[in-house]
């Protein structure tokens, strides 16, 4: 079931009316479970993928129950390793072809949302180990993992937030005015997703085709700039539109989701960009990759922790890029952003060392510096998105062609 479809709107309307027709906790839980199942039925057409999804949910739930019943310090390492191994295998990352025998990755298993479910599971494993995970049973865990609000592309919800909702699902879900705002957000998200993103993608395709036929430097530059800006516009409208639609849909049932976008193309540096773009992923990477690894480094090499922090920031954002997809182009995308974030941290520390705190505040407040910073960051991000579409060779050929047409 596509979000941008008449079927989804009918599905959501029926769910909204049935959900608010009763405030029985049991009824609402059953209804939400059925809604998640119906949505998944529309996504999965392959019985093998259904079996793989069932195995993933059952085994991961068993892992968590085992951790709760039998306290052992080694569980987090074992279970996180197994989770990441399953994720890498199911995603069929291209770099594995350099390490594994031919044919080992030639499987047809596809689990929609496996990346998001894996990150949710790792979060629960770590929080359970640290004694910070609220109570859970199979029903709450399955609905947390398979909720149609976030199973496709986030936001990455934390279990403690879902538990609050699941435990109080029988509460009144807001006023008519709030419901109207949620419906408005659903519709605006679908307009972004179905109209604006489609237009931007069409412009990108048209400009890419015309760029290849460009005769002179002026025509080549014009078409290149059009595709250079159109694809980031497509990614933003597509992803933020999806998030607006599902956050609005969740709000209709009384569930609050974390905001996932905050005007990312107005960021003044790469660190600021990732604090505005796919925010739930950034916070997950910060908490479970960067902070965890930085704490480990600081406890062992305190004197070198600051410098090693630059490397850890690079690794964290590199992994964020690789997480987006299994092909080499996403590795390059992650490499560009990892370098950008590490450079941002180095530059910020250098500014503080030279200017002092008061000087840095004056520097940041300067409107011209802000304009230049925002423009530079925006174009750096746009350049990174040249590698987002599949095919590194295509992007490299595009850049070579631009050079040959202009030089």
Image: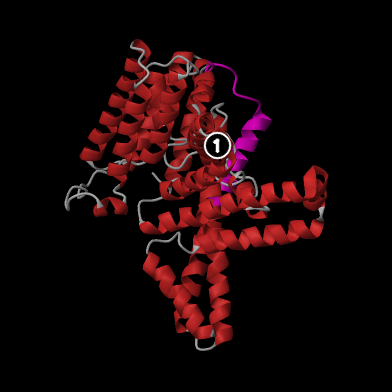
The residue lying at 30 percent from left, 20 percent from top is: 62
The quarter holding residue 383 reads bottom right
Q: Give the percent coordinates (x, y) of residue 356.
A: 79, 45
| 98 part of magenta stretch | no
Q: Give the percent coordinates (x, y) of residue 100.
A: 21, 49
Q: Give the percent coordinates (x, y) of residue 386.
A: 49, 64
Would residue 276 be found to the left or right of residue 117 on screen? right
Q: What element carries label 1?
A: helix
| 183 part of magenta stretch | yes
The quarter holding residue 47 reads top left
How dense is the environment of label 1, judged by Cα within 10 Å: few (below 14), some, or many (20 and up)? some
* Colour approach in the figure: secondary structure
Instruction: Considering the whole magenta stretch, tell me its main secondary structure.
Output: helix
The quarter holding residue 186 reads top right
Q: Residue furthest top?
A: 69
Q: Which residue lies furthest to the front in this view?
A: 303
Q: Is residue 306 above or below residue 31?
A: below
Looking at the image, which is closer to me, 7 or 172? 172
Quadrant (top left/top right/bottom left/bottom right) for the N terminus? top left
The residue lying at 59 percent from left, 53 percent from top is: 343
The residue lying at 44 percent from left, 17 percent from top is: 27
Q: In this view, does 357 lie above or below 36?
A: below
Looking at the image, which is closer to me, 278 or 104? 104
Which segment is the magenta one? 168-192
Q: Which residue in the protein does label 1 denote?
A: 283
């Amino acid at each position: 079931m596509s979000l941008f479809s008449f079927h989804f709107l009918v599905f959501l309307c029926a769910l909204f009316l049935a959900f608010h027709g009763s405030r029985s906790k049991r009824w609402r839980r059953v209804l939400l479970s059925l809604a998640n199942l119906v949505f998944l039925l529309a996504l999965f057409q392959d019985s093998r993928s259904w079996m793989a999804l069932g195995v993933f949910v059952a085994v991961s739930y068993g892992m968590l129950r085992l951790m709760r019943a039998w306290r052992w310090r080694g569980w987090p390492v074992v279970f996180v390793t197994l989770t990441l191994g399953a994720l890498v295998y199911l995603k069929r990352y291209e770099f594995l072809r350099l390490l594994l025998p031919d044919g080992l990755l030639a499987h047809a298993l596809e689990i929609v949302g496996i990346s998001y479910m894996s990150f949710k599971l790792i979060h629960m494993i770590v929080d359970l180990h640290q004694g910070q995970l609220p109570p859970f049973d199979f029903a709450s865990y399955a609905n947390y993992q398979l909720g149609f609000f976030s199973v496709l592309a986030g936001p990455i919800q934390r279990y403690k937030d879902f538990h609050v909702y699941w435990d109080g699902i029988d509460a009144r879900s807001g006023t008519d005015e709030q419901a109207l705002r949620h419906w408005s957000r659903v519709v605006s998200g679908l307009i972004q997703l179905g109209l604006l993103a489609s237009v931007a993608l069409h412009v990108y395709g048209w400009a890419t085709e015309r760029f290849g036929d460009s005769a002179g430097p002026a025509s080549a530059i014009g078409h290149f700039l059009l595709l250079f800006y159109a694809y980031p516009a497509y990614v933003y409208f597509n992803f933020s539109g999806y998030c607006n639609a599902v956050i609005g849909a969740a709000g209709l049932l009384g569930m609050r989701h974390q905001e996932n976008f905050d005007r990312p193309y107005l960021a003044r540096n790469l660190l600021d960009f990732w604090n505005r773009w796919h925010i739930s992923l950034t916070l997950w990477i910060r908490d479970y990759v960067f902070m965890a690894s930085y704490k480990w480094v600081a406890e062992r090499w305190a004197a070198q922790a600051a410098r090693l922090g630059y490397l850890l920031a690079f690794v964290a954002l590199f992994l964020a890029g690789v997480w987006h997809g299994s092909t080499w182009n996403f590795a390059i995308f992650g490499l560009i952003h990892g370098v950008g974030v590490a450079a941002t941290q180095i530059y910020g520390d250098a500014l503080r060392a030279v200017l002092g705190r008061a000087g840095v505040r004056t520097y940041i407040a300067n409107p011209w510096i802000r304009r230049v910073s925002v423009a530079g960051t925006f174009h750096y991000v746009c350049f990174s998105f040249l590698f987002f579409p599949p095919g590194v060779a295509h992007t490299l050929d595009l850049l070579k062609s631009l050079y040959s047409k202009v030089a």
